[in-house]
Image: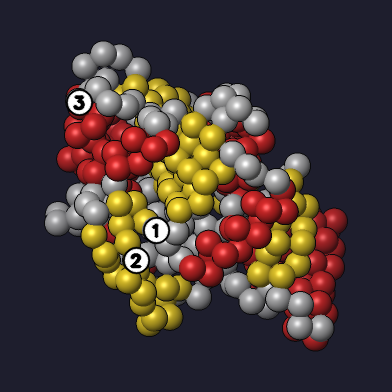
Amino acid sequence: MISNIATVLRHRGPAGLARVVLNGLQILVQGRLLGERFLEKPIYNYRMFLDTQDRGISRTLLLFGSRELDHKIILEEVLKPGMTVFDIGANIGYYVLMEQGLIGPQGRIVAIEPSPANAELLKKNLALNGCPQVTLLACAVSDRHDRQTFHLAAQSNLNTFHPVGSGTTHLTGKTIDVETITVPELLPEHGAPDLIRMDVEGHEVEVINGLVDAVEAGKMAPMIVFETHLTRYTPDHDLEKPLRRLFACGYGVPMAASSSAAGTAKVEARGYRGGEPIHTDFLTRVIFRDIKPDDAIEFICHSGGLRTVLLQKITAP
């Protein structure tokens, strides 16, 4: 407890600590004592219902009002009015609502979430903010149309198909079977996306494997924003191969955020220089630009160092 207070004080200052204490008291009084499961809070320029019983993303947003600012900065730079977004692992809508504000009323979002509890809260948050251009699909995206075992975590944002490495830490032992589809299966109804965003706890391997054939065939060329999960990658679950296929199609890494100060040091050791420090989630991250494919493979798949990565088609293959 004391170490947590010290951490908040160090990163947020006295005023930030006071806000966190007040927010914590609100969770205690309204959530625990009065039994109000969901609290409505302003997040940036939208509002969200947040789950007082969730120890993951809802708890973070209830206490601090923001998270993963590096991811937010990348989306704010690349999303434009009228774009189509596939948000894979949409969770409770933190990024979907952000994306809606960036693409405007002429844009479209397909929000895909396999957890029934998350999908239900996402539905409430879409209704709260008025999101007619968002289509919610209660399933998952993978490399094949199938049914797969989905492992549930105590934190709503850490559910996973891959209970290995850091993915085992917060699991409850409960599983559900969920339908999986591929990105190309969405194209006939929803069209080709301009951007795919995902934070899918290691399942980015399957998602990219499932879409790369369509990219090679010229059916789509979306920007892809994803979070890396180094401990989920193994020789049998390898992200390097699909990434190299995308690079062969003319994709590059125009933007990527470091994972931490240690990650920043790794990237800088290769001669890259990043932008201003981004203080988020009790870490300091930096956004780097124009990372070479071989270096990106090293930082994403082998040594670590990158957290949020933007893949974008830059040249013809």
In the displayed structure, does residue 239 sit left or right of residue 124?
left
The answer to whether the residues at label 1 and label 3 have Cβ atoms under 8 Å apart is: no
Q: Position of residue 134 (x, y in %)?
A: 56, 43
The answer to whether the residues at label 2 and label 3 have Cβ atoms under 8 Å apart is: no
Instruction: List the single residue furthest toward the front.
Output: 189
In what element is the residue under mark 3? loop
Q: Position of residue 7 (x, y in %)?
A: 67, 63
Which residue type carries mark 3? Ala
Give the residue displayed 66% in from the left and 69% down from the top.
Answer: 51
Disc 1/disc 3 C-alpha distance (Å): 25 Å
Instruction: List the single residue furthest toward the top.
Output: 316
Q: Which residue is mark 1?
A: 139
Q: Which mark is residue 178?
A: 2
Q: Position of residue 164 (x, y in %)?
A: 29, 68
Other residues around mark 1 within 10 Å, as few (<14) / some (14–19) / many (≥20) = many
Q: Which mark is residue 217?
A: 3
Q: Quadrant of residue 140?
A: bottom left
- Residue 10 in sight from this viewpoint: no
Which residue type carries mark 2? Val
**Disc nearer the start of the sequence (1/3):** 1
